[in-house]
Image (cartoon, helix red, strand yellow):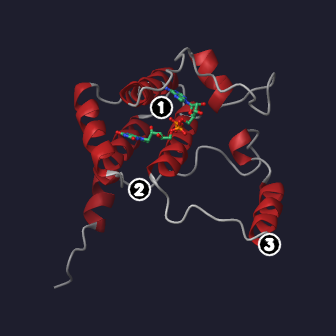
Amino acid sequence: MKQDDGNSNFKNKLGKLPPPLFGEDDCDRPACHDMMSQMKKASQASQEKKAVDCPPNSGVLGRASWTLLHTMAAWYPDQPTAEDQQHMESFMSALARFYPCTWCARDFQANLEESPVPTSSRKELCQWMCEQHNLVNEKLGKSVFDCDLKNLDKRWRKNTQDPECKTSGLLH
Ligand SMILES: Cc1cc2nc3c(=O)[nH]c(=O)nc-3n(C[C@H](O)[C@H](O)[C@H](O)COP(=O)(O)OP(=O)(O)OC[C@H]3O[C@@H](n4cnc5c(N)ncnc54)[C@H](O)[C@@H]3O)c2cc1C
């Protein structure tokens, strides 16, 4: 008999993977922009033989992770389907389980238990993510962020007034 490697179980639980939420022609968002100039920069950097973060330390990993998490929340649907909600819940619990900085993961798991991820709207998810990040900022003695949705959208979704993001959005 064929052995189950666990994948089929996972697929059964989550159902068929949904198609991406946007089509190829419909990507008017910064997260989709500018692949050519990024590729140019990457090739210049490799020619200059700059040191890379290899493997990443917790700061590099943290910045990259928060970038993904806040950007993903910024583009989460305003009215998510039940399936969207289930996938977001699974994603966050997998993150809490597998986040490679073990003490970060332990605290994040405890925070998730205390304040489960709200998946019923983009606004709630964005603000929850901001609060989660602020818990870590406070723990590390850093400035906290203003979790107003307009402020979060300027930093993580689209910013027409300050497209180069010269302001960080952090409160002092
Ligand atoms: C789930 C998780 C748990 C972590 N736990 C720990 C831990 O326990 N101990 C530890 O040392 N490190 C932890 N980290 C890493 C830590 O949070 C930082 O990423 C890391 O210290 C680098 O900090 P930074 O000052 O460069 O900017 P980051 O804190 O990574 O922030 C990057 C950018 O996000 C924006 N930002 C800041 N706060 C918010 C907010 N509340 N909402 C929206 N945007 C914001 C700012 O523009 C900032 O420049 C964790 C990371 C993650 C993803």
Mark 2 is surrounded, within 10 Å at the Cα level, by few (under 14), some (14 to 19) or many (20 or more) other residues, namely few
Q: Residue at x 79, y 25 (%)?
A: 162
Number of the front mark, 3 or 1 = 3
Q: Of residues 115 and 12, which is closer to you in this image?
A: 115
Per the model, the C-alpha gap separating discs 2 and 1 is 16 Å
Q: Of residues 53 and 107, which is closer to you in this image?
A: 53
Decide which of tag 3 and tag 1 comes sooner along the chain.
3
Residue 80 disc label: 1
Question: Under tag 2, what secondary structure?
Answer: loop
- Residue lying furthest left: 1
Number of the front mark, 2 or 3 = 3
Q: Is residue 137 above or below residue 23?
A: above
Q: Is mark 2 within 8 Å of ligand 1?
A: no
Q: Residue at x 48, y 45 (%)?
A: 62
Q: Position of residue 155 (x, y in %)?
A: 65, 28
Residue 47 disc label: 3
Q: Is residue 14 left or right of residue 73?
A: left
Q: Do labels 2 and 3 touch, CB within 8 Å? A: no
Q: Position of residue 86 (x, y in %)?
A: 35, 40
Per the model, the C-alpha gap separating discs 2 and 3 is 42 Å
Q: Which residue is mark 2?
A: 16
Mark 1 is surrounded, within 10 Å at the Cα level, by few (under 14), some (14 to 19) or many (20 or more) other residues, namely some
Q: Would you identify the image quadrant in which residue 131 lies?
A: top left
In the rendered image, the quadrant that contains the N terminus is bottom left
Q: Would you identify the image quadrant in which residue 75 lies?
A: top right
Per the model, the C-alpha gap separating discs 3 and 1 is 44 Å
In the rendered image, the quadrant that contains the C terminus is top right
Identity of the amino acid at label 1?
Pro
Q: How many marks?
A: 3
